[in-house]
Amino acid sequence: MENSSPRSVSFRTHRRGERSGLSMLSKDVEGGVFPGKVTPDSAMKIVCKKGVIRLLLVGVILWVVLILLATLFHVWSCHSSISFLSAMCNKNSTVLDMLRNMGFVAKPQLQHRCPIPVANDPDKIVIPEGRTPDEIVKKLTYVMEDEAVSDKTQSSPLFGGHESWSQREESFRLKPTMKVHCGFIRNGGGDMIPADIEYAEKCRFVVASGIFDGYDVPHQPSNLSPRSKKLFCFFMVVDETSLEFISKNVTVREDNNGGKWVGIWRLVLLKHPPYDEPRRNGKVPKILTHRLFPKAQYSIWIDGKMELIVDPLLILERYLWREKNTFAISQHKHHHSIYEEADANKRRKRYARPLIDLHMKIYRYEGMEPWSPQKKTISDVPEGAIIIREHTAMSNLFSCLWFNEVDLFTPRDQLSFGYVLYRLGESFRFFMFPNCEYYSLFILHPHIREHSSRIEWVTSWSQLKGNGTIKDKGKDWDQANAKNGLVESRGGLGLWTPYPANLDSVILPPVARTSKAG
């Protein structure tokens, strides 16, 4: 009896466990989890669930593989030497940009030169009759008297006049009839001799260039057609220093009327240089070509260190007449934003750093945004060494306003170009052509000697005010004219005239340096 009692207890416990297990199993079967006796509907549900999950996984994997294959094909086609595949490539695609930024694809090297789609024969070019109609500004006249001298607040007239901040602001408000400052103020300098004025009166087509401070000699254009030689006047604008330098280094021929020639170039002496700084003097014929040669309808400007290698008639047809443009200029090779260009100018010592910063602060305060792809312009920064123009009222107004900014602020005209575009908006239409075409228009010759002014090496306000030292680099215009300090006396006066707003809080946009060339 003593032995049977424990056995009965263990037995009862075992039976309870069986009943508990059976209860749980029955619940599992009802819930469809137990793998044993399963209903057909439950089995189908399990199979469907697993199948859908596998199908989704396979679809996702295939989709990723297809995207990878398409991306690889896109990259391969862009680097393929097969013309058919290369033509399929969109080199400006977002995918390529992302891969370049991530470092998976090398950034493309900018093409230095590319073929220019010019016509084949200059003799077959049809020159448009008449002039392009003036639609917005119909009549443009110029301020000829320096009002600040007239009212005796200043002692002598300036070439660009004493333009006030309010006059500057008014000049950007377009009207059918406008009168603006545009250099050549009476008794302000920049005079041509009568023989050159008389010769220029007959010129409808002009190729103009300029050499100042004697750092170059004229380079003869090549590939000129007989038609262009008869049609165009070739003017090389010089100061007295350059005329003397050229006369000593190349043959200068004088005609019966007193005109001086070097090959096809007629040397035009700009007497009484308007500015202290030779670089600023060079902006007069470059930007104000329509003022120097008022009878010209078309002009091509080319910097003095360049040799033109494309027939000028073909240039006018390609950049103006073909698409009915009145102003054409190349985009910069590296920079799109004026703030990028300003940073590069400071790094390369193109002008006093604090004055460049002040120039940019004024533009930033007046609403000038850094360039972005959302802007309607290809770029805000041009390569200004070649400018192609029809001298319409609107084109001339743009040139005047551009020059006024150069006169008021720094002589770096590439900094002012985009600002004038911003102020005129869509009213001024122009053609900014690819940079690789720009480099195909000329051969670049090195300067015979490099020009350098001490103001270009200034890095602080204390140096400008005479409280700092500047390492001597190259020829110093202030040493050659001992009475002058670092501050120019006849140009850039807007940087020294109190601005009608507080610029202390203005912060210049950050600049990403994308090129060693700057």
Image: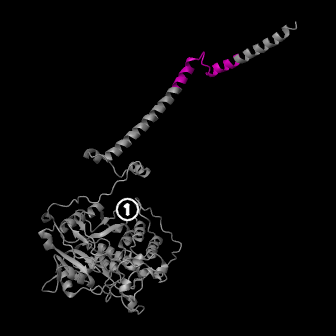
Q: Residue reaching furthest top?
A: 1
**Please, is residue 324 above or below residue 397 in the view?**
above
Magenta stretch holds residue 467: no
Q: Residue reaching furthest right?
A: 2
Q: Quadrant of the C terminus?
A: bottom left
Give residue 102's position: percent from left, percent from top.
44, 50
Instruction: Say which of 181 and 241 sits in front.
Output: 241
Q: Residues within 10 Å of mark 1 (few under 14, many from 20)?
A: few
Give the residues in magenta: 22-48
Give residue 251's position: percent from left, percent from top.
16, 80
**Please, is residue 341 above or below residue 352 in the view?**
above
Q: Secondary structure at mark 1?
A: loop
Q: Quadrant of the N terminus?
A: top right
Q: Amino acid at mark 1?
A: Lys
Residue at which label 1 appears:
376
Instruction: Give the number of marks.
Output: 1
Prevalent SS, magenta region: helix
Q: Which residue shows up at 37% across the image and 62% down it?
A: 376
Q: Which residue shows up at 41% across the image and 37% down it?
A: 65
Magenta stretch holds residue 45: yes
Instruction: Say which of 445 and 206 sits in front.
Output: 445
Residue 71 position by quadrant: top left
Residue 321 position by quadrant: bottom left
Give residue 306's position: percent from left, percent from top.
25, 70
Residue 436 in the figure: left or right of residue 337: left
**Please, is residue 375 above or below residue 396 in the view?**
above
Give residue 447's position: percent from left, percent from top.
28, 73
Residue 32 position by quadrant: top right
Q: Which residue shows up at 48% across the image and 77% down it?
A: 460
User: Which color mode does the image show?
Assistant: one colour
Residue 178 appears in view: no
Instruction: Say which of 234 and 290 sits in front.
Output: 234
